[in-house]
Image (cartoon, helix red, strand yellow):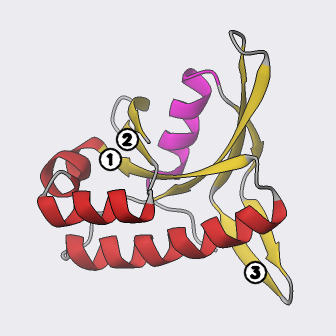
Amino acid sequence: MAKDKYHDAVKTALIKDGWTITHDPYPLEFNDLNTLQVDLGAEKMLAAQRHNQKIAVEIKSFSSVSMIKDFYLALGQYQAYKTALRQREPERTLYLALPWDAYNNFFKRSLPMAIIAEVELKLCIYDPSEEVITSWEK
């Protein structure tokens, strides 16, 4: 599978944020379908709670001509990965990583916000030029 154009920037941003990259990509097997791959798997120690937090991150650039088409495709992919991940490793939380400009210009609109709430979409917002995570939306 081809990596998203911001794959390396998000990977660097996660490392800067204290995450350890455990899989690149993170393979998902679901019964007879073993071709699913989330972009990254990562872990971070939460010292205050003394538990390991595990995540999988699907990276999207949202840089095509149609932001709504990118959204629909990412949403479908997220749902498929979330279902497969729940079966394989339910303690790992799935995040959709997207650039801050896509978040500010599209994801904050009423329809995307309603869909995000409905499907409980978890977002990792990143700045591709600075290679940093700007926020986590749960």
* Residue identified by numbered label 1: 99
Gap in Å between the C-alphas at discs 1 and 2?
6 Å
- Mark 3, residues whose alpha carbon is within 10 Å: few (<14), some, or many (≥20)? few
Query: Looking at this view, is 36 or 110 the one in front?
Result: 110
State the residue at coordinates (23%, 53%). Answer: 102
Chain part drawn in magenta: 5-18
Gap in Å between the C-alphas at discs 3 and 1?
26 Å
Percent position (x, y) of residue 112?
23, 63
> Dots 1 and 2: beta carbons under 8 Å?
yes
- Mark 1, residues whose alpha carbon is within 10 Å: few (<14), some, or many (≥20)? many
75 vs 127, left or right, is right
* Residue identified by numbered label 2: 125
Helix, strand or loop at disc 3?
A: strand
Helix, strand or loop at disc 2?
A: strand
The quadrant of the rendering that contains the N terminus is bottom right
Main secondary structure type of the part rendered in magenta: helix
Percent position (x, y) of residue 98?
37, 51
> Dots 3 and 2: beta carbons under 8 Å?
no
